[in-house]
């Protein structure tokens, strides 16, 4: 394959460890001044006004950052604004009412387009309807909905009337929904009768009804979107309303957007984690919206003329920030897709990119590795030349997957931004700026301008280049969560205690391990609990996995350690899935072990390599390491219901038995 300049793209990809953004990209980039880093640093925290300036404020703020009660920081104090106004009305007022705001693709290839005017109408009607049910300012409305347009519409309707939303991912259980509602003291629920997944109809309403039975304080009103029509009849109980009937009764009615304090809550998001109590992350109106608008502008390079597709479910923070609030604040067209990437066929994503001429595509490394495993013939069947920028988020991306994405999806023409951030941070924190920085596959990049990240050892001292340590953030940022809802103490304990002293509680501990190189680029190794102890040395499982997936024929790898033996040593287990069609033999096993020895160190070599057709994943696409540890230790597996692919467990257990 040649890239037209006579240079062999294949050869360049194999050898290169750095990539510069194409000139044609830099020329049109929203941000292309290298001086921006210095400028932000010299002018901190006022530099963040550049983010706030992307928004329309009802009242201008008087203080950029109030740090008098750290770590309960306040951003843009004194200012007021409405998030829905910023995401809708101002674009209509600017003459863009006929521009597409949301393009929704259903599982049957049906497409719905909501222009900004359409969105204005329906958000207003639903906002009026919510008010008529008694929802007032600051009442938390829970949204338990699949990927239907009514989900962002409901979020924006809540924002319009100053009612914080709390979205619970539709894949979660009735239990999770009930817990979320209890903790948020939420008396209103918007849900749907069900949704389609791989061509089958799933009942959501019955799960929601079960959750409601568990609520001590009961629920005031429930609104139900009828997604499945005749395919699934549902029963509306007392105080349960049909969405369409509600808004039809309010046709053409509008409600003034409620002016909210910058620090007023925009939404709550409960994260469950694999252990522990759910945490309600509180995000605010001004700081959050400024942060996601700015990062959509600077890192995703979004323009109002773009069609942007963030493939995450809106039930996760990624969907909140980069499907809904960021792109709509900038007046962009945002894509929503109801289905799965491999149904009806494995080219579904590329067919949508092709049909809708998507400009910017943002997805997770798990998805990229699946695409890689399925093979390049699926993207090759489609015209992907509309793409200008690619992004990844959610877990470390190994260089091989990065290069595959760069080559087969981006054709070597699109910068790839590997963005590190968290539900807690609200928006992106570490990534290259695509119009400024050189990219290094597998390395997220420098912290964004104005973001201060340091990788430290146990004592809080910065580690030397290349050494693994703990990822900390040493200065606040506008998109940060403000507390754990109803639990200020835990907010401090869990995130601010570890590396801050009592006098200065300003160091945020992200819970991730990382390294930083001579250029200040950060490589995120994964959650700290993914760091294992072998031969007395601590090593991120990601490092070993990254070496393994570099072996020809390997698609994905997960490394865990067994419990330490009496001598304090653990054994390394590697679970490996291969690219489709690739057979498994001892030679492959040897190559994997040797490569880890070569690339990292002999002590890190996996003692056991288990081949499995697929690795067990949570519904958000994270490999369930705890489960793989249990298998390695021969322990009881406990609850596997959180898995997206529970059938893999039996296959892996039998592979462990066979080896
Ligand atoms: C991981 C998703 C490596 C990390 C936005 C973080 C990443 C957790 C990256 C947050 C990345 C996210 N490289 N690891 N680019 N992005 N992570 O809250 O462990 O669902 O702490 O937010 O995902 O996951 P969350």
Image: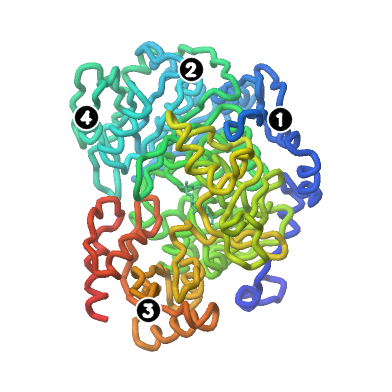
State if disc 1 and disc 3 touch (CB < 8 Å). Answer: no
Label 3 environment density (alpha carbons within 10 Å; few <14, some 14–19, many ≥20): few
First along the sequence among labels 4 and 1: 1
User: Which secondary structure lies at badge 4?
Assistant: loop
The residue indicated by pointer 2 is 161
Q: Secondary structure at mark 1?
A: loop
In this rendering, is residue 203 above or below 223?
below
Q: Is residue 391 left or right of residue 29?
A: left
Q: CB at mark 4 closer than 8 A to ligand 1?
A: no
- Mark sitting earlier along the chain (3/4): 4
Residue 25 appears anywhere in the view: yes
Q: Which residue is mark 3?
A: 582
What's the distance in space between the residues labelled 3 and 4, CA to CA? 49 Å
Give neighbour class at mark 4: few <14, some 14-19, many 20+ (Cα, 10 Å): some
Q: Which residue is mark 4?
A: 214
N-terminal of the pair, mark 3 or mark 2, is 2
Of marks 2 and 4, the one in the foreground = 4
In this rendering, the answer to whether 576 lies above or below 352 is below
Would you say the beta carbon of the disc 2 residue lies within 8 angstroms of ligand 1? no
Which residue matches tag 1? Answer: 53
Left or right: 173, with 515 as reference point: left
Asked if residue 181 lies left or right of residue 13, the reply is: left
Q: In which quadrant of the rendered view does residue 175 lie? A: top left
C-alpha gap between disc 3 and disc 1:
53 Å
Mark whose residue sits in front, 3 or 1: 1
């Amino acid at each position: 394959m040649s890239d037209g300049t006579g240079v062999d793209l294949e050869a360049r990809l194999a050898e290169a460890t750095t990539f510069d953004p194409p000139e044609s990209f830099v020329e049109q980039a929203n941000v292309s001044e290298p001086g921006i880093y210095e400028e932000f640093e010299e002018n901190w925290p006022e530099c963040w006004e550049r983010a706030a300036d992307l928004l329309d404020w009802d009242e201008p703020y008087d203080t950029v950052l109030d740090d008098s009660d750290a770590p309960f920081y306040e951003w843009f104090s004194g200012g007021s604004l409405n998030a829905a106004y910023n995401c809708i009305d101002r674009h209509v007022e600017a003459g863009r009412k006929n521009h597409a705001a949301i393009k929704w693709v259903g599982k049957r290839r049906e497409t719905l387009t909501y222009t900004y005017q359409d969105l204005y109408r329906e958000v207003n009607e639903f906002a009026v309807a919510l008010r008529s049910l008694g929802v007032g300012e600051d009442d938390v409305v829970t949204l338990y909905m699949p990927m239907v347009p009514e989900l962002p519409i409901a979020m924006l309707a809540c924002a319009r009337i100053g009612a914080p939303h709390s979205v619970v991912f539709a894949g979660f259980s009735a239990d999770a929904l009930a817990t979320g509602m209890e903790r948020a003291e939420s008396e209103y629920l918007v849900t749907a009768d069900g949704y389609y997944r791989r061509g089958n109809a799933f009942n959501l309403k019955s799960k929601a009804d079960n959750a409601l039975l568990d609520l001590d304080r009961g629920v005031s009103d429930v609104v139900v979107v009828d997604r499945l029509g005749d395919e699934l009849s549902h029963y509306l109980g007392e105080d349960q309303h049909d969405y369409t009937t509600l808004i039809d009764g309010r046709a053409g009615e509008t409600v003034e957007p409620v002016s909210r304090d910058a620090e007023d809550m925009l939404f709550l998001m409960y994260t469950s984690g694999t252990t522990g109590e759910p945490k309600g992350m509180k995000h605010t109106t001004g700081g959050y919206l400024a942060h996601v608008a700015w990062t959509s502008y600077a890192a995703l390079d979004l323009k109002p003329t773009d069609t942007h597709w963030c493939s995450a479910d809106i039930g996760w923070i990624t969907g909140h920030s980069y499907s809904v609030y960021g792109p709509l604040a900038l007046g962009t067209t945002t894509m929503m897709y109801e289905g799965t990437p491999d149904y009806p066929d494995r080219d579904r994503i590329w067919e949508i990119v092709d049909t809708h001429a998507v400009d910017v595509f943002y997805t997770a490394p798990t998805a990229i590795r699946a695409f890689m495993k399925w093979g390049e013939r699926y993207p090759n069947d489609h015209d992907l030349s509309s793409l200008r920028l690619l992004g990844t988020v959610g877990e470390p991306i190994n260089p091989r997957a990065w290069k595959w994405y760069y080559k087969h999806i981006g054709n070597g023409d699109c910068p790839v931004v590997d963005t590190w951030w968290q539900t807690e941070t609200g928006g992106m924190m570490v990534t290259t700026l695509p119009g400024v920085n050189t990219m290094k596959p597998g390395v997220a990049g420098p912290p964004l301008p104005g973001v201060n990240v340091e990788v430290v050892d146990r004592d809080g001292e910065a580690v030397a280049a290349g050494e693994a340590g703990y990822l900390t953030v040493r200065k606040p940022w506008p998109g940060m969560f403000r507390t754990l809802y109803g639990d200020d103490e835990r907010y401090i304990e869990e995130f601010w205690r570890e590396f801050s002293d009592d006098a200065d509680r300003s160091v945020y501990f992200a819970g991730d391990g990382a390294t930083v190189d001579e250029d200040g680029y950060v490589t995120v190794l994964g959650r700290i609990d993914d760091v294992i102890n072998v031969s007395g040395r601590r090593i991120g499982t990601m490092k070993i996995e990254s070496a393994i997936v570099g072996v020809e024929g390997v698609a994905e790898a997960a490394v865990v350690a067994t419990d330490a033996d009496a001598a304090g040593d653990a054994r390394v287990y590697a679970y490996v899935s291969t690219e489709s069609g690739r057979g498994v033999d001892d030679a492959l096993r040897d190559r994997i072990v040797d490569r880890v020895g070569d690339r990292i160190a002999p002590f890190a070599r996996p003692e056991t390599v288990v081949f499995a057709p697929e690795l067990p994943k949570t519904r958000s696409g994270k490999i369930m390491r705890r489960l793989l540890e249990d298998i390695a230790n021969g322990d009881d597996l406990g609850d596997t219901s959180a898995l997206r692919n529970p059938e893999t467990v039996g296959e892996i257990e039998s592979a462990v038995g066979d080896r």
